[in-house]
Image: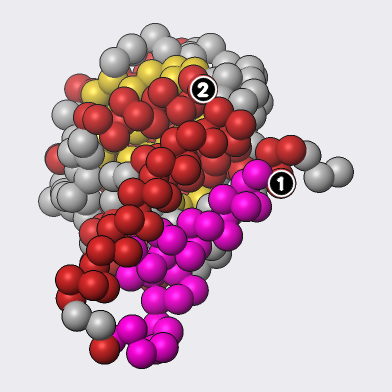
Amino acid sequence: MITYRHHVVSLVAVFLALAVGVVLGGGPLADADDGAGDETPASAAAPQTSLGDYADTFAATTAGALLDGGLEGRSVALVATGGPDDEVLGALTAHVEQAGGEVAARYELLDRLVGGSSTSLVDTLGSRLVDEVDDGAIDPDAPAYDRLGQLLGLALATSAPEGTPAGGNARTVRQGLAGADLLSTSDPDADRAPLVLLVLGDDTDPDVLSGLVSGLATVAGGTVVAAGSTSAREGTLAALREDGTPGGVLSVDGVETPAGQVTAALALLAATGGAGGDYGPAGEDGAVPVT
């Protein structure tokens, strides 16, 4: 059955693929050569800027219809790493609430974890925590960062659509990671959430990120990785996508813009159905996921 949201999102996908893709140099028309190169820089830049502004306005204006009720009864663990902008995190939180969901807690993966310089600590601590929680959900033989990603999943995520209270195992992992200066949280007692939104900043080791995301995805009901346009072109998100975004994980770029922020929220809606793929101006699977 085609819903009203599906119809509107389809229209948004077409519009953003053309408008945002052209503005930021990605999307289906990025490599087209139709003689536009003969324009002067001033004449070429003016319509592109207008398209970008209109794309953001269009996405913000239609966000209510796109998101309304899509996350009703769902909670999201908002995880930041590498120092993403607080305004971006605030906008993403607002869109989760606009969709009827709630942010269970905000977490930060600290530099000691994501910088890639503490592999020995991650390996040793991960092994100890696996022995302490001993619930059979963690693969003790997984690579160090994959295993820590699974432990993160146990600490803050769940596959149960309604979420679950943080039990003893979740608290044990949270305390262990916090004590080692690998993780901080706004609420040590927050419920485990079915959805994880991981927002990237600038300083995350790509190999570390790949392992953490792979591990998280084995526990969470849905995982979305969101980043800015620069990260998608030449940074951590680009590396993650080049290696192949883990199955069942959605990635979104351009989240420094209102259009990208709405797209990230739509990706959370898609994640509730087990979707994956790479979205945004530089995403191979389209501008926005159609839910």
- Compared with 129, 143 (above or below) is below
Q: Is residue 179 above or below residue 284?
A: above
Q: Position of residue 167 (x, y in %)?
A: 50, 13
The numbered disc on residue 98 is 2
Q: Who's the residue at 16% across and 50% down the image?
A: 203
Tag 1: Cα neighbours inside 10 Å, few (<14), some, or many (≥20)? Answer: some
Q: Residue visible at 47% across and 42% down?
A: 59
Residue 139 in sight from this viewpoint: no
Measured as percent of width and height from the top left, residue 182 is found at 22, 33
Which of disc 2 and disc 1 is earlier in sequence?
1
In the image, the segment drawn in magenta is 8-37
On screen, residue 206 above or below 102: below
Report if residue 66 is visible in the image. yes
Q: Please identify the quarter of the rendering in which residue 24 is found.
A: bottom left
21 falls in the magenta region: yes
Query: Magenta segment: does it hold 138?
Result: no
- Front residue of 175 and 98: 98
Tell how many labels.
2
Closer to us: 34 or 259: 34
Q: Amino acid at mark 2?
A: Gln
Question: Which residue is more in the foreground, 34 or 93?
Answer: 34
Tag 1 residue:
7
**Secondary-structure class at tag 2:** helix
Image coords of residue 212 (percent x, y): 37, 47
Q: Amino acid at mark 1?
A: His
Q: Is residue 156 left or right of residue 228?
A: right
Q: Which residue sits at x=43%, y=61%?
A: 19
Helix, strand or loop for disc 1:
helix
Residue found at x 32% / y 64%:
47
Separation of marks 1 and 2 at Cα, in angstroms: 19 Å
The quarter of the picture where the N terminus appears is: top right
Residue 163 shown left or right of residue 88 in the figure: right
